Image (cartoon, rainbow, N blue to C red):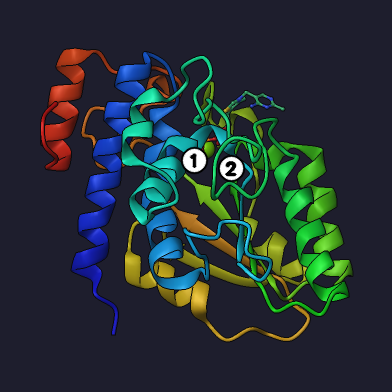
Amino acid sequence: MMQVNELQKISAEVRSDVIKMIGKAGSGHPGGSLSIVDILVTLYNKVMKVDPKNPNWEDRDRLVLSKGHGCPALYSILARKGFFDVEQLWSLRKLGSMLQGHPDMRKTPGIDVSVGSLGQGLSVAVGLALGAKLKNKKYRVFAIIGDGEMQEGQIWEALMSSIHYKLDNLTIILDYNKLQIDGPNEEVMSLGNIRERMQAFGFDVHEIDGHNHEEIYNALSAPVIAQKPRFIIAHTVKGKGVSFMENQVGWHGKAPNAQEIEKALADIGGTTI
Ligand SMILES: Cc1ncc(C[n+]2csc(CCOP(=O)(O)OP(=O)(O)O)c2C)c(N)n1
Ligand SMILES: [Mg+2]
């Protein structure tokens, strides 16, 4: 049985870290970091096989955060899992820090793929999943893409490839928060009926509340359908957990000031700095 309370507690801690990290850095992407917290917390605490003491373990499950700007959430989880010292979190985006504004696999233990240029990460995830098949490895590959990111042409090439190569070891999670840098997806470039489109492609499609740990877990751990990659449409809220950031496009790429940090941490139920 899932211990949802425990995951909720970890998620609150991660949300507090995200706010403090971006606040201290003075720049970053709070909205799209907060929307993926519950997905990442469930992945790393209940689903993925990883070893913080051996980050490059060959048989580990892989994560590609294709929407790399959401990395503060991932850094917090990796630190709290023991991949590196929690103190490192406060050096986010500083010159020479191991925690850059977008994930760098050469600098940060636990980061499987360097990302940041939207649209590219999913192709790497397809390659990793295909590699596992060719080498007869059992590891799974998870990729998180953004809904604005999904407008990139390369995403659609990668989707087609994953179907063509029958990559049932690949799970793609769409962080469907309905907003991108400059407005609602629907106004900028509609994604249409994603469920129908992905079903037509041939994916094993799941549609969930991306802030409900139990639903996230069930979608991630459902039995594999042979030869079908999985596509999870996770309905999320950009800025989730911080009242004044929720569903606000203006909080895509802006750091909170001292007063806003206090208010955000109070909303989350975290400690003050
Ligand atoms: C190729 C590319 N173009 C532009 C950017 C700048 N950029 C960073 S985040 C973002 C918006 C992405 O929207 P979405 O995928 O919906 O992210 P989320 O809502 O999860 O923050 C843009 C345009 C980028 N990182 N890469
Ligand atoms: Mg979005």
Residue 272 is left or right of residue 70, and the answer is left
Badge 1 amino acid = Lys
Q: Position of residue 261 (x, y in %)?
A: 20, 23
* Mark 2 crowdedness (10 Å alpha carbons): few <14, some 14-19, many ≥20: many
Badge 2 amino acid = Asp
| Element assignment for label 1 | loop
Q: Nearer the viewer, residue 247 or 131?
A: 131
Query: Which residue is at 54% across, 46% downward?
Result: 109
Q: Is mark 1 within 8 Å of ligand 2?
A: yes
Residue 19 is left or right of residue 76, and the answer is left
| Element assignment for label 2 | loop
Q: Is mark 2 within 8 Å of ligand 2?
A: yes
Which corner quadrant of the image does residue 228 belong to?
bottom right
Give the numbered dot on residue 178: 1
User: 136 above or below 32?
Assistant: below
* N-terminal label among 2 and 1: 2
User: 2 above or below 131?
Assistant: below
